[in-house]
Amino acid sequence: MPFVLAFDQGTTSSRAIVFDERGTVRGMAQTEFAQHFPQSGWVEHDALDIWRTQRDVAGAALERAGVRAADVTALAITNQRETTLLWDRKTGVPLYHAIVWQDRRTAGYCEQLKREGHEAQVRAKTHLVLDPYFSGTKLAWLLDNVPGARARAERGELAFGTVDSWLIWQLTGGAVHATDHTNACRTLLYNLHTGDWDDDLLALFRIPRALLPAIQRSRGVIAECTADLYGKSIPIAGVAGDQQAALFGQACLQPGMAKNTYGTGCFMLLHTGDRCIASQHGLISSRVAPTDGVSAQYCLEGSVFVAGAVVQWLRDGLGLIKSSADVEALAASVKDTGGVYMVPAFTGLGAPHWDPYARGSVFGLTRGTSAAHLARAALESIAFQSAEVLLAMESDADLRLRELRVDGGATANELLLQFQADLLGVPVVRPVVQETTALGAAYLAGLATGVWQTTDEIAALWQRDREFTPGMSRDEAADRMGRWRHAVEHAKGWGTGSAALQP
C-alpha cells in the first residue's frame, strides 16, 4: 500500500501525519514550540525550532504508523502562510527570528504606504490589502532593521521564504529554494494576474529579486529530501498554504463550495474557479491548488485573526478553565451570554475590517456576569466573526451558500458549531477526517505521484461526520449580528497608531 507523509507546520505546533491510499490517518505526531513576544504586538518564532520540531515529528509519525520510508511514495508540505524568514544562503543560518503572521510591527509602515497613495496599486496587482498580516512589509522590516541585511540581500547572499520555502530548503540540504503559488500570493510581492513576482511591487517594498524563491505548482515533484533524514530520498510533490490545503482536503473543488477552518484564527475560503473576484467588502482573493494541477484557480478568503486563541486566553490569561476542552461545558452552564459581547481583537481585526489598531474588548458587563457568560461570549465571538466574513463573500460572489464545511480543532465544540449554523442560516458540516489541512497537501502529493489518479477519487473519499442545522429565526440572527457590529465599532482604533479612537 502506498503512503504519503504530510508535514503540517502550524503557528503553535508542528505535526506530521502518514496517510494511506484511502485518506486514512495511519500515524501522527505533534509537538508545540515556543512563542516569542518581544514587544507588544510583536510575535516571533525561532526558525530552527520550526525545522527541528517538524523534522522530528515526521520521524515519529512514521514510527507510530509502522511505515518505513521505503514505503512512502511522496512527501507533502502545508504551512502557516505569511510568517516570514530570512537566512544565509551559504550557512542556512537565520538572520533573525521568523516574524509570525500575527505580528503587527509594520502597521505604521502600512499606514505610510497608504498615505503615499500606494494602496490602489497594491490592491489591483495582489488583491490583498496593505496590512501587517502579509509578508512583504515584514521582509522590508527585516532588511531595514537587521544590521547589514539589505547590503547582503542585494549581493545575493540571503534567502527569503515563508515556512514552506524554509522547510524545502532544509529538506534538500539547501539545494532547492522554492515556494508554490498559494504561498507566494500572500506576500504582497506576487501579481495575481501574471502568476509571478512583480517588479513594481519589489521596487515599492525595496526587495531585491535575488532574495526570492522560484515559484512552482502546488501539485508536482519540486525536489527530493536528502536520504539521511529518513533513510530514503522522498519526492516533495505537494505544497500548499494551510488554508488552501484545507480547501482541497475538504473536497471543495468546485466554484461555490466553501470551508472554514477553526484554529488559532479562522480562515474561510470560497472557491471561485477561474474567476478572480475583486472584493468590494474587505475580503481578499488568493490562488488555490487547481483541480487539474495546472490552471490558475482562485478563492475569496476572509481571515479572522483570533478564534481558538480566545479560548487559550481564557485558559492562560484569565485562568477561567484548566484546559481548552473545558470551555464548552462552562459555556453551556448558562443559557446565553447575559447580554455580554466579546470582541477578541488582541492582534487587531482582519477581514472585513482590517483595523490593526483594534483591541480586545468586552461589552455588556454587569454584576451578574460570570465566568460562564464570558466563556459563552468568547465562543460566540468566533462564530460572529466568521458570519461577517461569509456575508461579505456571498455579496462579492453574488451567490447564496448551500452549506459550510468546517474543520480545525475547535470543531470538536458542538455548542460553537450549532451557534454558527444558527447565525448563518445554512447547515454546518463536520467531516469524518478532520485533519483536512494535512490531508489536502497529501492529496496534492499523491495526485502528482500516482497514489490517486483523479480529483473525483478525492471527492469520493470525503465523508460527513455530523451536520448542524439552523435553529434560530432569521430575525433573531439579524438582531444578534447587529449588536455584534455595534460592539466591533467600539473596539476599533484603541491601539497606538494613527487611527483615531471611535466614540
Image (spheres, rainbow, N blue to C red):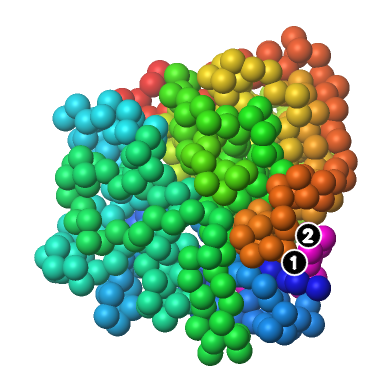
Quadrant, the C terminus: top left
Is residue 275 visible to us here? yes
Most frequent secondary structure within the magenta stretch? strand
Q: Secondary structure at mark 1?
A: strand
Callout 1 environment at 10 Å: few (<14), some (14 to 19), or many (20+)?
Answer: many
* Amino acid type at mark 2: Gly
Instruction: Please state the extent of the stretch shown in magenta in the rendering.
Output: 20-31
Residue 439 percent across, percent down from the top left? 69, 57
Residue 446 percent across, percent down from the top left? 67, 62
Decide if residue 157 is on the left or right side of residue 408. Answer: left
Q: Determine the CA span between mark 1 and mark 2.
A: 6 Å
Residue 145 percent across, percent down from the top left? 19, 60
Is residue 360 visible to us here? no
Is 25 a magenta residue? yes
Decide if residue 15 is on the left or right side of residue 425. Answer: left
Decide if residue 44 is on the left or right side of residue 88. Answer: right
Residue in front for this viewpoint, 320 or 309: 309
* Amino acid type at mark 1: Phe
| Residue assigned mark 1 | 19
Give me the residue at 72% from left, 43% from top: 251
Give me the residue at 21% from left, 44% from top: 199
| Residue assigned mark 2 | 23
Residue in front for this viewpoint, 462 or 331: 462
Asked if labels 2 and 1 touch by Cβ distance under 8 angstroms, the answer is yes
